[in-house]
């Protein structure tokens, strides 16, 4: 081996494999060594929850296939981590970070996992996450789960990791894998990608299958890629977007899904683009340092030929308040998921999960389970509550029609640009896509990114914009792990 894997891209690794400089087996071993040295020693970053006991065997098989028949494509032999709410039909568990589900074997791969395996990816393991996608309780820190403990921010351990795909973002940033899959309901890809200085793509709801993923909200959930570069994220996205007939949300992507998203990785993607900046409401919590980083990103985009419409305020921004949608959808979605599990699953209902936690409070209830109790005791699980129905309709009106659609149509925008993850609530409720790209670091070393968002199925345009900005700015740097061993 003569290749440095830290910050290596998928293209780097594929070239090295073709030249015989490294094998998939050797790559898996190198990631295992880094996980042992940095994730499970020192201050314990704790981003990797479980390793696939068959990872080396899978890598061996893919190496043999490459030698005899050639490569399947960009992901052949590439080690990928999955968030712990994504089913695998192998020797790994799927628990959403919960001790109540710690002994759960899903029995079958999620649809997107099947696609990754077909593409030749090595499923390296499961990433830690905020328990039940941050719907366990109020006041629990992001990145904590009763099964896996606390994930740390490798750039500054006193700062949060973001949730709920915290382990996925941190593991990618620390070079414990080539890339990872996260899931998002409301900021759960964009938020941890921001704080781990990685690229996260939150697709339009309906572009990527939801089958076989432990859910939070039927109307907002989606899986998406997390990687160190826009290119690697897009290569992963290309493997995920196959049609799943079992997921009714995918019907809306008919005629809008692209066969190849990598074709939109264009250096001139910002030339002539109209980028809107929704200053009202979304900038109120920025520090002066963060504002400087954002404004520098705008200057870079201007240099690349973008026209910045600033401000391009969202008319409904201050009307988007509390919604009962996730609270009501959680129990209904969870019960549907649990009903499809093997008969020996450790829990078959939300009530059984709550009861398990109450029977093991020292291990499971460090921060309580207020949200689980609210969902169990205050919702029917039938989605017939008047407040739920009104909130769902209000969300669609304020976030789609009168919100993002209105401002983008008024100013003829290609995208909105949000600081960090501050636009996640409106884009999540709309079901619209976002891509976050590293933009800089504060004096405390904390990463800060910018998020390109648009209307449904605007991923091609967002990829063009994000790639062009990333290739000019190139601000990402790996966290220093020397003090962690």
Image: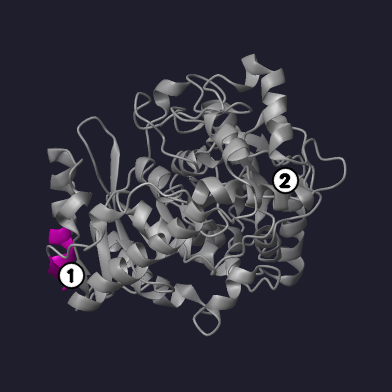
Local crowd at mark 1 within 10 Å, few (<14), some, or many (≥20)?
Answer: some
Where in the figure is residue 385, as x and y percent of width and height? 55, 53
Please tell me whether residue 300 belongs to the stretch shown in magenta. yes
- Picture residue at 59% right of the left edge, 56% below the top: 384
Q: Is residue 448 above or below residue 414?
A: above
Determine whether, in the image, residue 221 is placed left or right of residue 401: right
Determine whether, in the image, residue 471 is placed left or right of residue 306: right
**Mark 1 in CB contact with mark 2 (< 8 angstroms):** no
Q: CA distance from mark 1 to mark 2?
A: 43 Å
Q: Is residue 384 above or below residue 360?
A: below
Label 1, secondary structure: give it: loop
The residue lying toward the viewer, choosing from 341 and 84, is 341
Mark 1 — residue? 304
Residue at the outermost top position: 362
Q: Mark 1 or 2 closer to N-term?
A: 2
Where in the figure is residue 14, as x and y percent of width and height? 56, 61
Label 2, secondary structure: give it: helix
- Picture residue at 46% right of the left edge, 73% below the top: 262
The residue lying toward the viewer, choosing from 390 and 192, is 390
Determine whether, in the image, residue 96 is placed left or right of residue 10: right
**Within the image, what quadrant is residue 450 found in?**
bottom left
Mark number displayed over residue 107: none
Q: Is residue 136 above or below residue 108?
A: above
Mark 2 — residue? 55
**Within the image, what quadrant is residue 375 found in?**
top right
Q: Which residues are magenta?
A: 298-309
Count the labels in the image: 2
The residue lying toward the viewer, choosing from 283 and 459, is 283
Residue at the outermost front position: 386
Please tell me whether residue 460 belongs to the stretch shown in magenta. no
Q: Is residue 430 visible?
A: no
Where in the figure is residue 88, as x and y percent of width and height? 73, 50
């Amino acid at each position: 081996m003569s290749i440095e894997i830290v910050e290596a891209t998928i293209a780097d690794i594929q070239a090295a494999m073709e030249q015989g400089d490294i094998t998939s087996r050797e790559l898996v071993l190198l990631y295992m060594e880094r996980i042992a040295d940095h994730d499970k020693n020192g201050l314990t970053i704790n981003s990797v929850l479980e390793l696939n006991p068959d990872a080396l065997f899978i890598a061996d098989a893919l190496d043999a296939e490459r030698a005899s028949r050639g490569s399947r494509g960009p992901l052949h032999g590439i080690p990928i981590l999955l968030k712990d709410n994504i089913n695998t039909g192998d020797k790994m568990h799927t628990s959403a970070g919960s001790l109540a589900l710690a002994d759960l074997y899903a029995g079958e791969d999620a649809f997107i996992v099947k696609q990754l395996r077909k593409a030749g990816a090595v499923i390296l393991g499961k990433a830690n996450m905020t328990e039940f996608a941050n719907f366990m309780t109020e006041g629990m820190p992001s990145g904590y789960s009763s099964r896996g403990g606390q994930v740390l921010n490798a750039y500054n351990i006193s700062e949060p990791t973001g949730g709920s795909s915290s382990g996925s973002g941190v593991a990618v940033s620390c070079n414990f894998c080539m890339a990872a899959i996260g899931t998002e309901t409301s900021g759960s890809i964009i938020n941890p990608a921001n704080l781990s200085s990685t690229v996260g793509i939150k697709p339009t709801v309906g572009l990527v299958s939801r089958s076989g993923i432990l859910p939070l909200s039927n109307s907002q959930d989606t899986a998406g890629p997390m990687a160190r570069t826009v290119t690697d994220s897009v290569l992963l996205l290309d493997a995920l977007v196959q049609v799943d007939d079992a997921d009714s949300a995918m019907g809306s992507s008919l005629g809008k899904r692209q066969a190849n998203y990598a074709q939109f990785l264009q250096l001139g993607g910002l030339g002539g683009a109209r980028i809107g900046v929704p200053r009202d409401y979304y900038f109120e919590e920025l520090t002066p340092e963060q504002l400087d980083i954002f404004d520098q990103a705008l200057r870079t985009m201007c240099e690349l030929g973008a026209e910045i419409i600033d401000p391009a305020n969202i008319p409904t921004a201050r009307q988007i308040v509390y919604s009962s949608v996730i609270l009501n959808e959680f129990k209904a979605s969870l019960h549907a998921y649990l009903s499809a599990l093997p008969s020996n699953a450790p829990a078959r209902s939300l009530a059984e999960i709550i009861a398990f936690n109450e029977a093991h409070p020292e291990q499971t209830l460090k921060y309580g389970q207020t949200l689980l109790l609210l969902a169990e005791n205050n919702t029917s699980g039938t989605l017939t509550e008047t407040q739920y129905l009104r909130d769902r309709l209000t969300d669609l009106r304020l976030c789609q029609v009168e919100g993002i659609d209105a401002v983008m149509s008024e100013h003829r925008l290609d995208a909105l640009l949000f600081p960090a993850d501050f636009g996640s609530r409106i884009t999540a409720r709309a079901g619209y896509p976002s891509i976050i790209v590293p933009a800089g670091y504060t004096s405390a070393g904390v990463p800060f990114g910018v998020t390109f968002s648009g209307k449904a199925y605007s991923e091609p345009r967002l990829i063009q914009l994000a790639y062009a900005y990333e290739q000019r700015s190139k601000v990402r740097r790996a966290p220093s792990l020397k003090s962690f061993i």
